[in-house]
Image (spheres, rainbow, N blue to C red):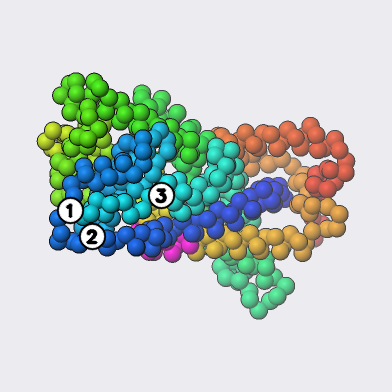
């Protein structure tokens, strides 16, 4: 078993290490999104006098819509203070622009494409490598094999009679074992946090996220409503659908059924009542207010707090501003709550700066693991071959049961595993030079003492 697990650990690491380093670096930077975005928006935090008269929210939206010809309101972000520029998201189809409006003078002070904001780019670099669905598949595949790498690494770490030195702390005074100890001890201390990060990131992935959504649709009898997207394509589809619905509500027949949204100049008048009703509720910011997207639909207001357990969703009557429904985080389905806690912890926002520090140390530890593993491999590899551990003499049933279970829980990993085994069996083993280079030979039995 030990020989086979060493081999699985080696090949998982061989594929994962570039992705582990990339995800650690981009993820570590994204941890500080609130601080970075606050720095970027600092020039627009004090554009209006707090005691001066401000334009109505509907007038602010009209200013933003005029700044982006052909656009309609997507979301109005409730300002946290009376001094800061109001951020309004307008767009056409799946495209969105974030317009910063001076609420006192009703002038545009900044316009930026939502997808070109720095932290949105970092988010896509981290989750999709800026390569769309293909990038999401690659990241998910790497995450799945990293889970296998960590689990096999914990098995290899197990002390088996060794003392605390080299197990819980590295033997710094012994150069011969320094890299081995650094790898093993770092692996122990970051493994469980790394597993939590990997598992909590899966709902965003195109493949596993769709897998979860399909299971939920069968179990719940309807398509689930989730406040996270499964990849950029899913996010763009949601944007485009909302835009089309908003435009339909602003058409010539939008006044039917009591709606009063027929004319562009007065179409956002209800926003003034909605803002007046939402502001006293003091929802966790940022608070996003959106117009109806279907006949008979209501205005919505939602807390988009990074600490997701603080989120609240409201629907409001356009004519009166009255709250029709309210759903707090604790009223969501169990799966949504579990994913919400996981996503908040993944982004470092669940328990403040301590969460950020834990995730940052985990990312640093994963980079150290990657570097130490490369050093160990380079120092130990025989000349002329890859240096993979040799194949064990027996196929261990328990090991295969565990791997099959992991493949069922992570379908993309299972599919890739089948592909790897087929290529090894049907192609590589038939090419002696390739077989020798990859170490596809039986491990020699240990000498009997």
**Which residue occupies 50% across, 64% down?**
361
Relative to 128, say whether 359 is above or below: below
Q: Which of marks 1 and 2 is nearer the N terminus?
A: 2
Q: Distance between the residues labelled 1 and 2?
A: 8 Å
Percent from the top left, x then y, of residue 30?
46, 56
In the current view of this chain or complex, which residue is farthest to the left? 320
Say which mark, if any, is on residue 112.
3
Q: Mark 1 points at which residue?
A: 54
Q: Which of marks 1 and 3 is nearer the N terminus?
A: 1
In the rendered structure, the answer to whether residue 288 lies left or right of residue 191 reads: left
Within the magenta stretch, is there residue 151?
no
**Which residue occupies 55% across, 58% down?**
25
Q: Distance between the residues labelled 1 and 3?
A: 23 Å
**Which residue occupies 19% across, 34% down?**
266
Q: Name the residue under label 2.
A: 48
Front residue of 268 and 416? 268
Q: Mark 1: which secondary structure?
A: loop
Say which mark, if any, is on residue 434.
none
């Amino acid at each position: 078993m030990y020989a086979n697990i060493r081999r699985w650990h080696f090949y998982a690491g061989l594929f994962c290490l570039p992705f582990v380093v990339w995800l650690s670096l981009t993820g570590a930077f994204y941890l500080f999104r609130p601080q970075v975005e606050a720095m970027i928006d600092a020039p627009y935090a004090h554009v209006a006098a707090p005691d001066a008269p401000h334009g109505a929210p509907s007038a602010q939206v009209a200013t933003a819509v005029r700044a982006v010809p052909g656009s309609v309101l997507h979301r109005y972000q409730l300002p946290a203070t009376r001094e800061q520029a109001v951020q309004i998201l307008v767009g056409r189809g799946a495209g969105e622009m974030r317009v910063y409006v001076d609420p006192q003078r009703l002038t545009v002070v900044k316009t930026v494409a939502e997808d070109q904001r720095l932290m949105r780019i970092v988010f896509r670099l981290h989750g999709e490598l800026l390569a769309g669905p293909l990038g999401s598949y690659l990241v998910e595949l790497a995450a799945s094999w990293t889970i296998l790498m960590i689990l096999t690494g914990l098995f290899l770490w197990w002390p088996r009679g060794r003392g605390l030195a080299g197990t819980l702390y590295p033997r710094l005074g012994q150069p011969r074992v320094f890299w081995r100890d650094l790898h093993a001890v770092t692996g122990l201390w970051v493994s469980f946090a790394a597993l939590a990060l990997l598992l909590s990131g899966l709902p965003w992935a195109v493949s596993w996220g769709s897998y979860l959504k399909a299971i939920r649709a069968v179990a719940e009898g309807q398509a689930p409503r989730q406040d996270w997207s499964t990849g950029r394509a899913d996010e763009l589809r949601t944007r485009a659908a909302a835009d089309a619905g908003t435009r339909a509500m602003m058409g010539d027949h939008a006044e039917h059924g009591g709606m009063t949204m027929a004319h562009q100049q007065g179409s956002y008048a209800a926003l003034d009542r909605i803002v007046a009703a939402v502001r006293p509720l003091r929802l966790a910011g940022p608070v996003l207010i959106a117009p109806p997207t279907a006949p008979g639909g209501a205005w919505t207001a939602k807390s988009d707090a990074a600490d997701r357990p603080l989120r609240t969703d409201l629907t409001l009557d356009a004519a009166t501003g009255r709250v029709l429904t309210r759903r707090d985080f604790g009223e969501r389905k169990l799966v949504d709550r579990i994913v919400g806690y996981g996503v908040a912890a993944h982004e470092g926002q669940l328990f403040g700066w301590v969460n950020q520090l834990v995730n940052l140390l985990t990312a640093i530890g994963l980079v150290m693991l990657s570097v130490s593993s490369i050093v160990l491999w380079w120092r130990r590899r025989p000349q002329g071959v890859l240096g993979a551990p040799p194949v064990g003499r027996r196929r261990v049933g328990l090991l295969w049961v565990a791997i099959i279970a992991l493949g069922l829980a992570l379908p993309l990993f299972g599919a890739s595993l089948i592909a790897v085994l087929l290529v090894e069996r049907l192609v590589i083993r038939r090419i002696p030079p390739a077989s020798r280079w990859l170490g596809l030979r039986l491990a020699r039995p240990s000498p009997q003492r």
